[in-house]
Image: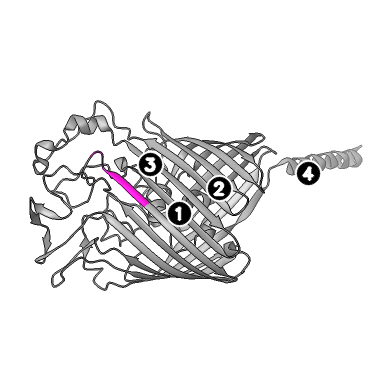
Amino acid sequence: MKITRIAGIAALLAAGFTQAQAQTPAVKFDGALIEFWYTQMLDNNLRYNSPAKSYYDGLSSSQANVGNAQGSLGRFQENTFAIKRSEVYLSGKVSDDVSWNVMFDPNNSANGTGNNVLQDAVVTWAFAKGFTLKAGQFKMPTTYESTLVSAREILFFDRTQLSRLLGERRDRGAWFSYGYGDAAGFQGKLNVAISNGTSDDGSTGKNNDANAQKDWTFRFDGGYGTAHKFGFWYREGETGLKSSATVAGTTAAWGATGATAAQILDNRDKTTAQGVFYAYDDSTWHADFEYATGLLGRRFPTLYDTTASAVKREHLDQKFTGYALTGVYKMGAHWLTARYDLMNYNSGDKWYTAFNPYKESAVGTPLLVNGAPVDYTPKYTEITVGYNYLFVPTKQTAGKLKLDYITRSKNFLIPRAGQTGEQGGNSLVASLMVAF
């Protein structure tokens, strides 16, 4: 009995183990992305200058408005090498209907505060034809470039100002979608998401809920064939400020027209954003356009105080407007690119002071620095011209070399001693991206 029975039991155990292995969901490595930067800021006074009343992102951490953590601070040094991305993608299936995916970027461990390494952690349930429900941590369905253009497909040194402000922050929640149509004809997808919205949109946004309010996001994605994409979206939320909280009211600089403490509390830093987009792409041409506007709200959660150095909102109902237009001409492995990118953080020109705080120091008195007038209206433009060399001409996602020259508006640096007039800084950026 002894040897034959032991052998039989061993065979059964081995068969059971093999069957268990077959049923265990496998982890799939979906690849990785590495992007390496060299940037030269063409303003050799950058390390000495300080920001004006600027919402613009991307200055070195010592220059930037700490309350405005939009974008990747420190990326525009005078002369620097940097790792822009080092993303790793994993996925797996629990069943035919349930899957998961994770993306993390170890390069983000030192950027900002909070949980930055883990980017996406999503469970997806395709519970019926065309219907999908996913939950976890991910970007909300807002801007075209942030959520419909992967990091492997970015055409320039970085995404647009619009995307950096509105679309790059991850949040935790659930996303329902229904897709329909013909791949060769018209396609549509309805997306509805609910998320914590706990951050001020200037931090990582990847936090558990600390209040009862939620953000709601809706987007319609449309397409025709493979060449045309279009859509529109809307997002709304507010802070979790308690109704019993105490907040500061108006300052002397605002005068009698300034917001009261009750108005600030009642507003709860409500934030909205709505936009439209269109993109065309074929083997020779690419073009896209996106526009968005809304209430600045919690993205700059504190109203401006003339005694504070950090730039914040000038008005509770301060609105932003942004748009970007891109064009690309493709010649095999060689692509010529151009983009016009605008973001205005006070498009309604609203403020509480009796004078324009961006242009005046008092009623009728121009704002002077070193004896010269300056205009610090938070309306920033980037005009970028570039060249992409694709390592695999038929597959831009495999890797590319991007060379970009960026011309920026000259209203975000304060002239230092000996300088007069508005100060800015153009940049040259070389980006080497590979994916595997």
Distance from label 4 to label 3 (Cα)? 53 Å
User: x, y (%) of residue 398?
Assistant: 59, 64
Give the vertical position of 123 relative to 242 (above or below): below
Foreground residue among 217 and 433: 217
Q: How far apart are marks 2 and 3 (CA)?
A: 27 Å
| Residue type for callout 1 | Phe
Mark before the other along the chain sequence, 1 or 4:
4
Specify the label residue 18 is tagged with. 4
Q: Is mark 2 on a helix, strand or loop?
A: strand
Where is residue 407 drawn, in percent x and y? Answer: 34, 67
Q: Which residue is drawn at 12% across and 58% down?
A: 367
Q: Please rate how many residues cluster around mark 2, counting C-alpha atoms within 10 Å: few if below 14, some from 14 to 19, many from 20.
A: many
Q: Which of marks 3 and 1 is in front?
A: 1
What amino acid is found at the position of numbered circle 3 in the picture? Ala
**Under tag 1, what secondary structure?**
strand
Q: Which of marks 2 and 1 is nearer the N terminus?
A: 2
The image quadrant where one finds the C terminus is: bottom right
Q: Earlier in the sequence, mark 2 or mark 3?
A: 2
Which residue shows up at 26% across the image and 45% down it? 348
Residue placed under numbered mark 2 in the picture: 102
Q: Give the range drawn in magenta.
A: 316-322
**Which quadrant is the N terminus positioned in?**
top right
Q: Which mark is residue 273?
A: 3
Which residue is tagged 1? 289
Separation of marks 2 and 1 at Cα, in angstroms: 30 Å
Q: Say which of marks 4 and 3 sits in front.
A: 3
